[in-house]
Image: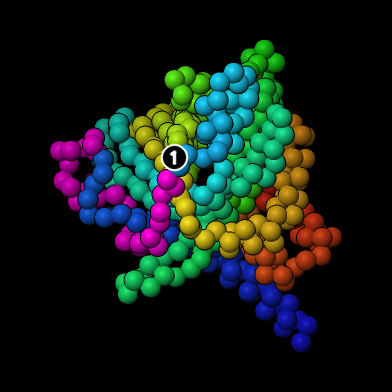
Amino acid sequence: MANSLNFRSLFTACMGAFILLFLSLEVLSETSATPDVSRYTFSWPYTDGDEMKPRGGTTVGAPLRLASTPSLHWTELQAPNLTKKAKDRLAILAMQGPYRASFDFLESVGYLSPYVPPRPYQSWGTEYVYVVREEEDFISLQHILVMFMQDEDEKIKGPFVIKHWRQDWKFENTLLIEYKGQNTWLPLQLDKEKVRGTWTQAVFQVDDSPRYESFGRWAHEGGVSTWESMKTWRPLPRREFSVRDDYDALVGTNRHTITPSGWIHEERNFKARGDMGKVSSIIAQELGFNRYERIEGHDFSAGDRYWENTGVFWGLVRDKWGKVFRSEKSFSISRAEDDTSMLFSMMALANSIDSGELSDEKGIKEEIEKRFEKYVQIHDK
């Protein structure tokens, strides 16, 4: 009986994680707007319209209401006589809260011959951005999706809860974790003078593994606050890694701009072949425009419960990654011999904790250690 219960618990956890991952891979690739109408003004206008129809399905989200007033942090950001650093911190903190997020990506230039532009990409989601930690020189923001879907009979289904990405902001940070290609990251030590007055933004995947990190300065002019990164390498995004194998990494820049209604994330990416931070060829340029619009009245309570149930677990995962980063050694993340991934395994573990199947802290720490030993390789050189 004990073995049966253990198997059933494991099966439940794995299936739950599978559902979450399925949603994260599929629901986010569906559009909530009219899918037959292209919204791009320069999406290869001489190409047949069907060939430029954005990738995605026809899923419709529940009705939403946009916020009618600016956020408190944006309002505070407009106050006179603030120091530069105070404005920087308020701009970062202004990214917290409830949002309707839309994600648009378009290959705008091709560098191969012959070149056939792929279909653009559109997706959407409703997500809450939580403040995980707030200190004078450090702010951590966790994104959690809470989705409600409308079926063909206009019935609302959900909520579907998915832990999304995380962004950590550090002031005058001298140690970066750089992606160098081939699922490998290396520490980069920066000179104190070079980073004076800058903030680094580190972005992490849904399982809290690193994605990319870069530094830049916030600029505040005319009531507009914008941060722009240096050139940054990153792995293939989730929207691409299952459908593309013709490039190895995105090499590009990010720009975040705070608005009264939310914030904008702009990307200019080059799809590159290369290894260890060296580009051998570039196949295309991609432009990305991600809009976060504040909403009111959306029920995020399921996300609150998920974060309450799993917050300690994810904190332990972050602590473990912190030890890897502080070793100042290069490391890689790879699939195991049984062809499982760290992402799937870690999300399955989180689901078992959320459901109450696993609650012993010692046992949780042991499970985290097993996963790091299985999927993370730290290199001596």
On-image quarter of the C terminus = top right
**Residue located beneath label 1 in the image:** 261
- 62 in the magenta segment: yes
Nearer to me, 91 or 367: 91
On-image quarter of the N terminus = bottom right
Tell me: 320 left or right of 90.
right
Residue drawn at 55 percent across, 46 percent down:
97
- Residue 161, quarter of picture: bottom right
Residue 155: x and y in percent read 38, 73
- Residue 371, quarter of picture: bottom right
Residue 118: x and y in percent read 29, 44
* Coloring applied to the structure: rainbow
Residue kind at label 1, given as amino acid type = Ser
In the rendered structure, which segment of residues is drawn in magenta? 41-68
Q: Is residue 373 visible?
A: no
Nearer to me, 257 or 26: 257
Looking at the image, the residue that sits furthest to the top is 193
- 11 in the magenta segment: no
Residue 83: x and y in percent read 62, 19
Q: Is residue 46 visible?
A: yes
